[in-house]
Amino acid sequence: MMNDHHQKVQASHLKRDAYLYVRQSTLRQVFENTESTKRQYGLRQRAVALGWPEERVIVIDTDLGQSGAATDREGFQRLVAEVGMGHAGIVLGLEVSRLARNSMDWHRLLEICALTSTLICDEDGVYDPAHFNDRLLLGLKGTMSEAELHVLRARLQGGILNKARRGELEMRPPVGLVYTSEGTLVLDPDQQVQHCLRWLFAAFARTGSACATVKAARDEKLAFPRRCAKGPHKGELLWGSLTHDQVLRVLHSPRYAGAFVYGRCHTIRTIDGRTRLRRMPRDEWVTLIPGNHAGYISWEEFELNQHRLHANAQAMGTDRRRGPPREGPALLQGMVLCGRCGQRMTVRYHDRHGQLCPDYICQRERIKHGQAVCQRVPGTGIDQAVAAVLIEAVNPVALEVSLVVQQELQSRFEEADRMRHAHVPPVSD
């Protein structure tokens, strides 16, 4: 076997350098599993035995403490670059899992090694990726390494899911909730923290808008608490001005309503190798247990807040269909379309003889492209005309006719449903 290894090592390989790749998955392993690190560094003697001078054995150990499944490993990228430029005669690693934990990185390295006639050496032997049998064996080793990682993750995730389904999984609570020594989630004993959160929910119930809640906090000079999530002050309570994203986080969190939730977000990998969080719809959450612990509001109040936030969010986007009630006497705010370009028009007020008079303005192009306002229409006459039509449309006779028509339509719908249930095709009039 040793002779076979030396037969694969040619003079063309020895003219280039030997690269030893050293990696541990976590910093804890680096400090505690020192024997594995020693074994990896010991592969330098294996390269010397194969014919490389010790000074030409280059050690790459900048990825100590990084997972083999990570895509941003600086050391591995350097290794691939050196192999691709033809500087490496052999790549040494204790085992396949030290080089890569996913098939994409592993097979990319095999492709480059085959093109540049670079050998690969692990604890079991020396392989030439340009040879079919060696490449087949290396491919199987890479698949087994990736499968091993999948099994380990599945075991850990299975335990987490079982606890989450029972509502017993301890997760970092939001500000205003803390765990007791018995593992029960309760309201923060700090009365000032409780007061701030109760004020926030009351202010949103009064104003119906997250922005208005932020303005009210600013007017009252109210400081809002938050907990530091990382760094040397991790877990400490910090105070600062209330921001819009803080309000939304609090209002969207079911935990303030006493519910245990798990699986609201999934981590997905993008085409460029990065990861991002994707919010899942409620029917795809892993666990939702209302009334699991103490909360600041009831579940019914939480549902009402979500309905209001959803309605407010419809005021954003390309076609703002709806928004929270705004101040001002304009009847058609948020409902007027520009007759020239079809964009949604906004409302501006000016004072005329002590009264607020609206103007409907189409300024989308000015905001987006710095162009002139498309058109400005005085709103007083339009509002008066709309008010007259509305009053005429809601007279008792018109209401009675509308109710009769609605009842007739409803009866037709019900009759059509009965016919569909009976599998009888509807008869046209």
Image: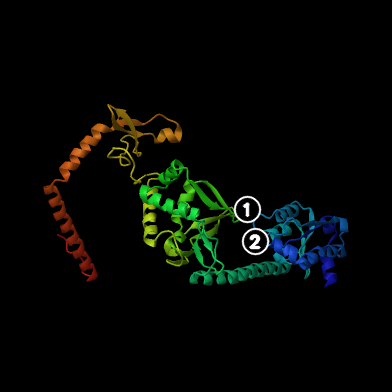
Residue tagged 1: 233
User: Which residue lies under the disc numbered 2?
Assistant: 69
Question: Circle 1 sits in a helix, a strand or a loop, which is it?
Answer: loop
Residue 59 visible in the current orientation: yes
> Can you give x and y, in whole percent of width and height, for residue 3 in the image?
85, 70
> Mark 2, residues whose alpha carbon is within 10 Å: few (<14), some, or many (≥20)?
some
| Residue 165: assigned label | none
Q: Nearer the viewer, residue 291 or 51?
A: 291
339 and 191: which one is in front? 191
Q: Which color mode does the image show?
A: rainbow
Side of 263 relative to 80 (left or right): left
Quadrant of the image containing the N terminus: bottom right
Circle 1 Cα neighbour tier, 10 Å, few/some/many (<14 / 14–19 / ≥20): few
Question: Residue 156 is drawn in which quadrant?
Answer: bottom right
User: Which residue sits at x=46%, y=42%?
Assistant: 218
**x%, y% of residue 170?**
54, 66
Viewer-closest of 79 and 182: 182
Residue 286 appears left or right of 233? left
